[in-house]
Image (cartoon, helix red, strand yellow):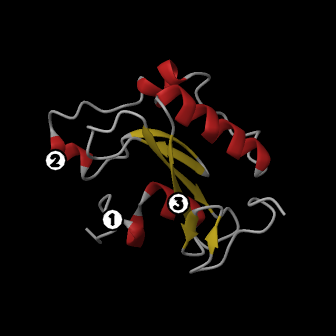
Amino acid sequence: MALRDGFPPEGLEYVGGESDGFEYKTVFSGMNLKYSYDMIKAFLIEEGYEDVPIPKTEEELNLFRLPTRNRQILLFEDNGYAHFPVKILFPVDGRNKRKLILSIYNEEAEDALLRFHRKGKYQTDIFGQVI
């Protein structure tokens, strides 16, 4: 069953990633950024998210990377691409140029959009600490 059709409950490991019932998170790390991004695109199609718009290429994805000179901004903003229910993020530590973090949010969960955008009572920093 595809992830979109049966979101994994809290604590369940699914295809190398983990779920808290609201967010599924996994990491892709290929030979380079292109391979990592190609793996994410294939995963999204396999898991039922082919209709979610994402950047066409890794070059396009790179345009969503925040400048890392100001690390304080990176604590409060997603460093990468986000379109509900999918986030494709660059690691906070920018040294690994081939790693990407994929987060998929449970569209059926209560307050899913607020959780996705970390708004209201779900306002947190990138480490999940309430602000």
Amino acid type, residue under disc 3 in the picture: Lys
Q: As drawn, which residue projects farthest toward the top?
A: 59
| Rendered-image quadrant of the C terminus | bottom left
Q: Residue at x 59, y 60 (%)?
A: 105
Q: Which residue is mark 3?
A: 25
| Rendered-image quadrant of the N terminus | bottom right
Q: Secondary structure at mark 2?
A: helix
Earlier in the chain: of badge 3 and badge 1, it is 3
- Dot 2 alpha-carbon crowd within 10 angstroms: few under 14, some 14 to 19, many 20 or more: few
Q: As drawn, which residue projects farthest toward the right?
A: 1
Q: Is residue 52 above or below residue 116?
A: above
Estimate the spatial distance between the alpha carbons at disc 3 and disc 1, rounded to whole Å. Answer: 16 Å
Instruction: Name the residue nearer the viewer: 74 or 25.
Output: 25
Q: Residue at x 73, y 46 (%)?
A: 49
- Dot 3 alpha-carbon crowd within 10 angstroms: few under 14, some 14 to 19, many 20 or more: some
Q: Which residue is mark 1?
A: 124
Q: Nearer the viewer, mark 3 or mark 2?
A: 3
Q: Which residue is mark 2?
A: 72
- Dot 1 alpha-carbon crowd within 10 angstroms: few under 14, some 14 to 19, many 20 or more: some
Q: Are marks 3 and 1 in contact (CB under 8 Å)?
A: no
Q: Nearer the viewer, mark 3 or mark 1?
A: 3
Quadrant housing residue 120: bottom left
Quadrant housing residue 37: top right
Q: Residue at x 61, y 41 (%)?
A: 40
From the top left corner, tell me how far across and down residue 30 is, in percent. 51, 37
From the top left corner, tell me how far across and down residue 53 is, in percent. 66, 34
